[in-house]
Image (cartoon, rainbow, N blue to C red):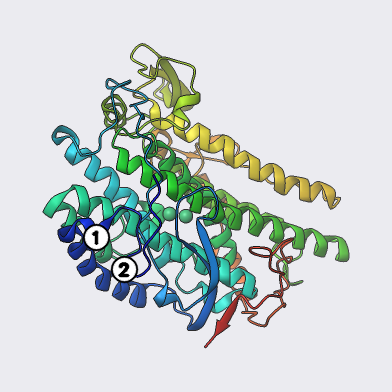
Amino acid sequence: MTTTADYTEKIPNNVNLHEDRRLQRALESWQPNFLNWWQTMGPTLPTQDVYLRTAVNVGRDGWAQFGHVAMPEYRWGIFLAERDPGRTVGFGEHKGEPVWAKVPGEYRAELQRLIVIQGDTEPASVEQQRNLGATAPSLYDLRNLFQVNVEEGRHLWAMVYLLHAYFGREGREEAEELLHRNSGSLDSPRILGAFNEETPDWLSFFMFTYFTDRDGKYQLGTLKESAFDPLSRTCEFMLKEEAHHMMVGTTGVDRIVQRTVEVMREHDTDDVAGLGAIPLAVIQKYLNFHYSVSLDLFGGDTSTNVANYYTAGLKGRWLEDRRKDDHKLTSDAIMVDALSEDANGELSIGQTEVSALVGLNTDLRREYTADCQGGVKRWNRILEEGGVRQRLKLPHAAFNRKVGAFAAIEATPDGEKIPAQEWERRQGDWLPTDVDKTYVRSLMQPVHQRGKIAAWIAPPRNGINGQPFDYDYVHLL
Ligand SMILES: [Fe+2]
Ligand SMILES: [Fe+2]
């Protein structure tokens, strides 16, 4: 049963919040803190209003409403996908049992931890992107940035709802902490590394929404399988919104590559720096960076914690029900990345076999990599159609890693292990240098006039919600 959101309430929701006064009051007292966080850590560009979609329901037809809204008045709501009354646990030792409407005491700490880690990434990305509005290449892009930002804010609400509704006092304390940690803060940084990196320019933003938001999609996909039904239903609905973030990243990089190809052809040169476009070599370096730090988000190649989460039914696999096995994995094996040592103690890049349960992070990371190849293929098609012979590619899993088996070594993007001194000497060939970053930033001049676009990026093929590109997506102050 879907309950339509009641927009006369302070907090729009489809969870019958008014039936639980205590919970409602607790969330209403968190709300001003959230708004205060949005005002101090959210988008810095002053706007009058923005053409945004707002989630109003979860049903198949029309879960979102489009309209110009003043951002601080955006209706962040709590929406869970519809409950499937017959849903059973899809994997692990509880497979086949009815899913849980409440948190089982024995899994309380683990579930809370999973929700806090997911919740921490949502406001982090808003913080990382807060200054981008000042350099938006068009009003269309500016609107997309703000759409991503308000929805990450809503995802924070989604996790805070679970913490308040199911985890008591501790949950409420964690909800406060989610507003106190800040991206890049020395004293209280965000939990995961990639969420403390800056997003200083729009090439980074599009790479972030392609690679790092996509990590989010895969994490949400595993939580959507959870036996804890409210978590599953929350994540299912978040994934719908996440699809737009992926679209922003995918088409953003498309349009940059497109523009670069045009300038390369027009001037018959690869060296488009100084011609107002972003050289393919620089795009490749940004790709290398964002992909490798996003791989780190999947954690170690092996993890007994994750094995336990799976067995307990807390966190499943990507598209669990499409897997053709027993969904318990107690006797299966998987090859995972590893370093092997020869007789001389020399390390080399290789693989080793572990139990499938222990290798679940690897399973998820490989699904993610296969998905990322899709973007590279698209961008290479643009290069091919433009008659350019260079191609983009994903770096090897051993490249630039800080987490997992390969954190201990240095490797080229082709996966050749190299000594540390060589890495020091050559890393500027593979990762953005200060010169690259300064050049990209020099291009980031705002284009805030309706229907106009910056010279380093092609216009989008379609507007938002059937509107043309030159629509008045944002009214600035
Ligand atoms: Fe999100
Ligand atoms: Fe996202």
Residue at x 24%, y 60% (from the top left corner): 18
Task: From the viewer's side, name the closer residue of 156 and 302.
Answer: 156
Residue denoted by label 1: 18
Q: Is residue 190 above or below residue 202?
A: above
Task: From the viewer's side, name the closer residue of 226 and 373.
Answer: 226
Say which mark, if any, is on residue 47.
none
Residue denoted by label 2: 9
Q: Is residue 196 visible?
A: no
* Amino acid type, label 1: His
Q: Secondary structure under badge 1? A: helix
Q: Are marks 2 and 1 in contact (CB under 8 Å)?
A: yes
Residue at x 68%, y 75% (from the top left corner): 471
Give residue 124's quadrant in the image.
bottom left
The 10 Å Cα crowd at callout 1, few under 14, some 14 to 19, many 20 or more, is some
Give residue 266's quadrant in the image.
bottom right
* Amino acid type, label 2: Glu
